[in-house]
Image (tube, helix red, strand yellow):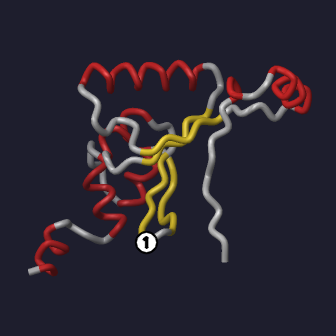
Amino acid sequence: MAQAYPYLLLPHLLSSRNRARRRERGDLSRAVLVDEPMVGLDPRGARLIKQVFREMSRKGVAILMSTHTLEVAQEMCDRISIILRGRIIARGTVDELRALAGGADEQLTPVFLKLTGGTGLQEIEDVF
């Protein structure tokens, strides 16, 4: 079976004629998909990217972000989905995820560990 890959259609790469057609139909892209956008950036670059994302969001663009850095997700995202073994096991705001985990943890990491059933140490111990 063929695997479908997500793609990003950047409106500025379309010809003006195609942009006009898409605008008339109302389907000009209003979403951006990014994977680990902060990896490899120094603090100044990360701050710039966060500012750009906030401005895009303010203008109505949806930012779909994949990240393993829970602090970035907590700071930047209105809604978070937690994926375990390829399936979404929890979805909501940080407060909703805290409630699902049954705690009042400030940081998202303990919430993630409770929802995924691992402490991290158990997984390391399993290797040895």
Snapshot quadrant of residue 103: bottom left
Query: Which residue is depicted at the point 24% across and 27% down?
Result: 42
Above or below, 25 relative to 65: above
Above or below, 109 relative to 40: below
Across and down, in percent, residue 28 comes to: 77, 31
Query: Which residue is depicted at the point 27% across and 48% down?
Result: 105
Quadrant of the snapshot with the C terminus: bottom left
Quadrant of the snapshot with the N terminus: bottom right
Q: Amino acid at mark 1?
A: Arg
1 left or right, relative to 51: right
49 left or right, relative to 87: left
Across and down, in percent, residue 3 comes to: 62, 68
Snapshot quadrant of residue 9: top right
19 left or right, relative to 78: right
Query: Which residue is depicted at the point 16% across and 74% down?
Result: 122
Label 1 crowd bin: few (<14), some (14–19), many (20+), radius 10 Å: few
Across and down, in percent, residue 57 comes to: 57, 26
Query: Which residue is depicted at the point 90% across and 28% down?
Result: 21
Residue at image mark 1: 85
Above or below, 51 relative to 95: above
Pick the residue in front: 34 or 125: 34
Q: Secondary structure at mark 1?
A: loop
Pick the residue in front: 15 or 72: 15
